[in-house]
Image (cartoon, rainbow, N blue to C red):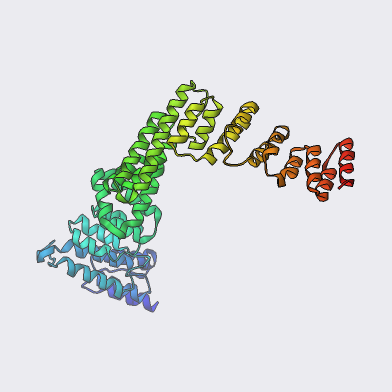
Amino acid sequence: MGQTLKVLNAIRYYEIGIPMTYQQYTLLSPDQLLTRLTSRSLHLLALRIANYLSLKPDPILKHWACAKIAQTRPGGGLGTAGGSGESDEAVARGIIEKFEAMGAGAGSAGVSYAEIAKKAWESGRTGLATMLLDHETRAAEQVPLLLGMREDGRALEKAVDSGDTDLVYQVLLNLHKRLPLGDFFKLIEDGGPKVAPASKLLQLYARDQNREMLRDFFYSDDRRVDSGLLLLEEASTQEDISARFNSTKAAQKFFSEDRERGFEARMVEESARLLALQQTLEKDVDGKAPFVGLSVSDTIMLCIQCGLSKRAERMRGEWKVSDRQYWWLKLRALTEMKAWDELDAFSKSKKSPIGYEPFVRHLVSKGYGKQAGAYVARCDPAKRGELYLSCGEYRAAGREFKEKGDAAGLSEAIRLCPDNLTKRELQGLLSSV
């Protein structure tokens, strides 16, 4: 009751002139009374009553700040009737000091510097609005107003500083929609390390949603290697062979323009050359075999399987395929074709640079033990018994083990042999060792 009487006496004072009764006060509520005082610009009295009643002063301070902005103009000029002229710096300092003194400064849940800054901007005082926004801690309120004020660089920096990915994307998409593409890229490039995270987020977005924009961004930033990598990535997914070839050649051009990427340039050039060759090979076989996209080794193998042996030999020389590698490729290709006569002729064409044990082991691994046995005699004598065993040639293995006096080898052959008659023969050999 005592508090209420003091408040009523204060507002009934002749300079205030609000003859409110106790019943009216209780029905109106203290908050509504403060609103009426604020609307009459009686901010000091409203603040004192709010402090006396332990009420939050935030709405009063907001109204006072907006009124202060409206009543002043920069450069000391007069605003509305009865106002005074103050510079933007003085007004900003006065508002900030008052807010902090009343406990409604940065971080307060009740008063937003962004709301006051918006009022300043609407009044044509962009400098004052910017000063006030510097003290706004909530980026979600700060950034949209900066965008509206066309403070694009500052908005992007504040969004990045907030660590809010969604807010950064909001700024980027807003700027991309509003600015010419060149100005948009220049804004990001001029931001330097401060907006580097925004640049990375833009690349992630563009890689997934707008590759044309990403290509333009790399080009504007003179990032030749990234441009080349992007083209190679696109080439790997293109169905049209001509488009893939053109993308690969364009990528090679980007790499060649960077002195430190000579190796990559050569590799991409070879890739383009291989792609052109594969396109020709597919035409030669009327599209019956899929050459495009294969490695050099697989292309040579497919040439052999398609009967293009001369083309395979030519590729061997052009791509500097070693003898060992070529023999392995032809061994695999002829095995898949089950071209046993051709494989035998190839093995006798000259001394094998890989030996003949690989012939045996490869054929056995593919389930062609009978054909593999024909090459064991040309292998190292010390390994022939073991190789014959792997081919399932138990009699031949037994003879090899007997010649070497290898009782353990004969025992192993007897254990593995599935035929009883052959087992008895091997047992006879074992008894004579």
Query: Can residue 336 be seen?
Result: no
Seen at 31% across and 43% down, the residue is 254
Seen at 64% across and 26% down, the residue is 341
* Nearer to us in this view, 353 or 343: 353
Q: Residue furthest top?
A: 286
* Nearer to us in this view, 430 or 10: 430
Seen at 31% across and 67% down, the residue is 34
Tell me how many marks there are: 0
Left or right relative to 337: residue 297: left
Left or right relative to 202: residue 335: right
Residue 241 place in picture, x, y as percent:
41, 29
Residue 99 place in picture, x, y as percent:
29, 71
The quadrant the N terminus occupies is bottom left
* Nearer to us in this view, 89 or 31: 89
Residue 230 place in picture, x, y as percent:
38, 43
Work out whether 332 lies above or below 27: above
Query: Can residue 321 be seen?
Result: yes
Residue 166 place in picture, x, y as percent:
40, 52
Identify the image quadrant of residue 347. top right
Identify the image quadrant of residue 394. top right
Q: Residue furthest bottom?
A: 2
Seen at 38% across and 33% down, the residue is 245
Work out whether 373 lies above or below 255: above
Left or right relative to 362: residue 75: left
